[in-house]
């Protein structure tokens, strides 16, 4: 997907709530006004892609225990120059969870978020606090497929019932503003 197609896709996306409406504007402005918006060398903010991974009957979601945040969280990562964010999300799920069969439930954007990232150490180097302008996709994987950790990023990979996933995360803002929203949106698709 080209940058222009991604911009069009974000412009056409209908925000689910006020948070997404506000963040949609920020994300579009950032992409349009920064020639390095997709690179983490932009130390103020950069584009990321995340995945809300569900199993076939939608009874479970896939989470990883993220080493930097010390919490169970969704999967995803940096665009690193790519503008096909669905491909980034799928790649990150495969890498972070050690699974090979991951498919989009839809190729459409599932949600949008502006995420704060506190300063932290990564690979022996300090990374200053910054923003992740994030595009999320709804993906499906087999909850019976073996999973494995990616030791430099996480120390656990597991499937949880949606309510259990909320209880496992120790990041209040994510639980209230991201994960609860994603669970609600996924349920609405299958009513």
Image (cartoon, rainbow, N blue to C red):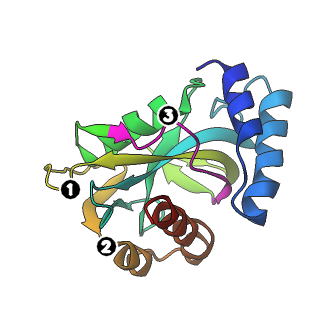
Magenta run includes residue 138: no
Q: Which mark sits nearer the N-terminus, 3 or 1?
A: 3
Secondary structure of the residue carrying tag 1 is loop
The reply, left or right, for residue 153 in relation to residue 188 is left
Q: Nearer the viewer, residue 20 or 70?
A: 20
The reply, left or right, for residue 165 in relation to residue 127 is left
Instruction: Tell me how far mark 3 sits from mark 1, CA to CA.
Output: 20 Å
Please name the residue that numbered disc 3 is placed on: 86
Residue contact between numbered discs 3 and 1, judged by CB atoms under 8 Å? no
Tell me where residue 73 appears, x and y as whole percent. Answer: 43, 63
Q: Which residue corresponds to the image point at 77% horizontal and 37% vertical from the top-left?
A: 11
Q: Which residue corresponds to the image point at 65% horizontal and 38% vertical from the top-left?
A: 47
Please name the residue that numbered disc 1 is placed on: 143
Q: Which residue corresponds to the image point at 65% horizontal and 30% vertical from the top-left?
A: 38
Tell me where residue 180 appears, x and y as whole percent. Answer: 54, 72
Instruction: Name above or below for residue 73 compared with residue 176.
Output: above
Q: Quadrant of residue 21?
A: bottom right
Magenta run includes residue 113: yes
Tell me where residue 123 appears, x and y as whole percent. Answer: 43, 43
Tell me where residue 126 appears, x and y as whole percent. Answer: 57, 48
Instruction: Tell me how far mark 2 sits from mark 1, CA to CA.
Output: 11 Å
Q: Quadrant of residue 84?
A: top right
CA neighbours of label 2 inside 10 A, class few (<14), some (14 to 19), many (20+): some
Instruction: Residue 150: tell me if it is visible.
Output: no
Q: Residue furthest bottom?
A: 167
The reply, left or right, for residue 121 in relation to residue 18 is left
Q: Nearer the viewer, residue 99 or 72?
A: 99
Secondary structure of the residue carrying tag 2 is loop
**What's the magenta region?**
103-118
CA neighbours of label 3 inside 10 A, class few (<14), some (14 to 19), many (20+): many
Please name the residue that numbered disc 2 is placed on: 161
């Amino acid at each position: 997907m080209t940058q222009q197609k991604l911009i069009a896709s974000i412009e056409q996306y209908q925000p689910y709530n006020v948070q997404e409406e506000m963040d949609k504007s920020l994300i579009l402005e950032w992409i349009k006004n920064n020639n390095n918006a997709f690179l983490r060398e932009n130390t103020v903010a950069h584009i990321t892609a995340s995945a809300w991974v569900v199993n076939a009957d939608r009874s479970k979601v896939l989470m990883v225990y993220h080493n930097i945040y010390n919490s169970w969280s969704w999967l995803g990562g940096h665009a690193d120059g790519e503008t096909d964010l669905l491909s980034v999300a799928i790649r990150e799920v495969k890498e972070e969870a050690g699974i090979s069969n991951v498919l989009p439930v839809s190729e459409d954007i599932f949600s949008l978020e502006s995420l704060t990232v506190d300063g932290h150490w990564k690979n022996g180097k300090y990374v200053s606090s910054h923003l992740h302008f994030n595009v999320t996709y709804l993906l499906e994987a087999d909850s019976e497929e073996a999973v494995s950790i990616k030791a430099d990023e996480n120390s656990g990979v597991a499937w949880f019932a949606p309510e259990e996933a909320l209880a496992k995360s120790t990041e209040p803002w994510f639980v209230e503003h991201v994960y609860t929203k994603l669970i609600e949106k996924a349920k609405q698709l299958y009513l």
